Amino acid sequence: MAQTRSDQSTRNQSRGRGWHGDPEGHANAGRKGGTKVSQDRSHMAEIGRRGGAKVSQDRSHMAEIGKKGGEKVSQDRSHMAEIGKKGGESR
């Protein structure tokens, strides 16, 4: 018996990695540590601190972040005018 294209795609969807086709499983994927862990604010803050410390060691990455931020801020002409005015007043 010949397989139709829909039969093949259905079979391929059931195999593979990830939570494809299971929205509930996908929603729970980030909660592997349990709700008790995610409700502990100090634990989550420590995870954030560790991640920030690790990222900040990569100077080229931090330079890229700063460059993007500077480009975004410089597009705000009123903000740039205010900065210029303050600089002129300080002389």
Image (spheres, grey):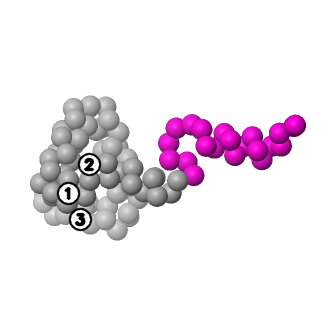
Is residue 54 positioned above or below 30 on the image?
Answer: above
Magenta segment boundaries in residue numbering: 1-21
Is residue 57 positioned above or below 84 on the image?
Answer: above
Residue name at image x 26 percent, y 53 percent: 34
Q: CA distance from mark 3 to mark 1?
A: 51 Å
Instruction: Name the residue tied to disc 1.
Output: 36
Residue name at image x 42 percent, y 57 percent: 27
Camera-near label (3 vs 2) is: 2
Q: CA distance from mark 2 to mark 1?
A: 8 Å
The N terminus - image quarter: top right
The residue carrying pointer 2 sits among few (fewer than 14), some (14 to 19) or many (20 or more) residues within 10 Å by Cα, namely few
Instruction: Name the residue tied to disc 3.
Output: 85
SS state under label 2 = loop
Q: Is residue 85 magenta?
A: no
| Image coords of residue 69 (percent x, y) | 34, 50
Task: Determine contact: label 2, label 1, CB under 8 Å.
Answer: yes
Kind of residue at badge 1: Lys
Of pointers 3 and 2, the one earlier in the residue sequence: 2
SS state under label 3 = helix
The C terminus - image quarter: bottom left
Of pointers 3 and 1, the one earlier in the residue sequence: 1
| Image coords of residue 35 (percent x, y) | 25, 58
The residue carrying pointer 3 sits among few (fewer than 14), some (14 to 19) or many (20 or more) residues within 10 Å by Cα, namely few
Q: Is residue 18 magenta?
A: yes
Kind of residue at badge 3: Lys
Kind of residue at badge 2: Gly
The residue carrying pointer 1 sits among few (fewer than 14), some (14 to 19) or many (20 or more) residues within 10 Å by Cα, namely few
Instruction: Name the residue tied to disc 2.
Output: 33
